[in-house]
Structures are given as structure tokens and as C-alpha cells.
Amino acid sequence: MTEQKKRILLVDDEIDIVTMIRMRLEASGFDVIVATDGKEALNAARMHNPDLIILDLMLPTMDGFHVARMLKYDARYKNIPIVMLTAKAGESDRKTGEDVGVDAFFNKPFEAEKLLAKIRELLARSSAGNAENK
């Protein structure tokens, strides 16, 4: 039996960043779904139920905090790890992120290898938690 690829929802409105991250994730064996604004991100999360979400903070239609809050307060999606990408690195942003359930923060620009390591860590933790809950 082959292990199913982990599905990652990548949400960013900057095409260069989407292209770079998507290529790295796909080369690392992940299935990637892309959304470019907040409403599209919510719809994609609900439709595809990803294993992890990489979410930009500043997005058209709805910011990343709002998207994270809506997903984390919904029992169906609350256990999906969220990695927030942001050009804003203030302490108040990190605090808000923690308050809405963001699992990790990366400031742009970031090192792709560190992002991949954090993704693997969060997926492993999430899988272990899901196994315990069954």
C-alpha cells in the first residue's frame, strides 16, 4: 500500500512566491492546491480538506488572520496546521496569529529548507494527534 501524498493549500497573492514554494513542495512529494485571496482560500480549504495550510497574512478580500480564525473555530478544520507567511514581523502580529490558532510564523523572505522542515514537523505532529483521536 502506498502512502497518500499530503495535500497542502498554499495561499498567497504574489505569483513569484507561489511558484517558488509550489515547486519546492511538489519536488518534496506534496500535492499542492493554490488560492490567491482569502475567500478562495476558505473555499479551497473546505473543498479539499488539506493536511496543512501555508497562508499569507496580507491577502485580497480577507486577510490571513480572518481566514485562520474562521478555519480554527470550525470543528471540521480546527486541527489543520497553519503556517503564516508575512512581510509584517511585528510582535502584535505574532500575538494575533497565536490568538487565532496559527501554528508557525515565517517572515518574508524566508529559507525554503526551514519552511520545509517546519511543514514536516507540523504534519508529523498532526498525524500523531489524529492517530491518538481514533
Image (cartoon, rainbow, N blue to C red):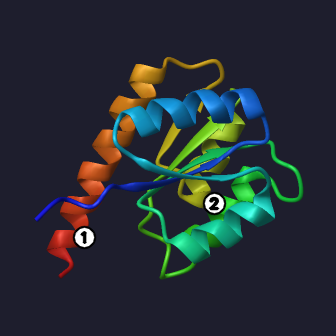
Residue 9 visible at all: yes
Q: Position of residue 50 (x, y in %)?
A: 47, 63
The image quarter in which residue 80 lies:
bottom left
Instruction: Measure how far apart labels 2 and 1 are at the Cα level.
Output: 20 Å
Q: Residue at x 64, y 18 (%)?
A: 109
The amino acid sitting under disc 2 is Ala
Residue receiving disc 2: 68
Foreground: 61 or 68? 61
State the mark number for residue 65. Answer: none
Image: 87 above or below 94: above
Q: Residue at x 49, y 17 (%)?
A: 111
* Left or right side of 101 for 125: left
Location of residue 132 with respect to 37 vertically, above or below? below
Sequence-first tag of 2 and 1: 2
| Residue in view at x 41 percent, y 67 percent | 79
Q: Secondary structure at mark 1?
A: helix
* Residue 124 picture location, percent across and down: 24, 50
Give the x, y percent position of residue 60: 88, 51
Query: Which residue is the extreme one toward the left?
Result: 1
Instruction: Answer left or right for 37 relative to 30.
Output: right
- Seen in the image, is 60 located left or right of residue 53? right
Q: Position of residue 90 (x, y in %)?
A: 71, 28
The residue carrying pointer 2 sits among few (fewer than 14), some (14 to 19) or many (20 or more) residues within 10 Å by Cα, namely many
Disc assigned to residue 130: 1
Residue type indicated by callout 1: Asn
Along the viewing direction, whichever of 19 and 41 lies nearer the viewer: 19
Q: Secondary structure at mark 2?
A: helix
The residue most toward the front is 1
Which residue: 18% across, 82% down? 134
Quarter of the picture holding the N terminus: bottom left
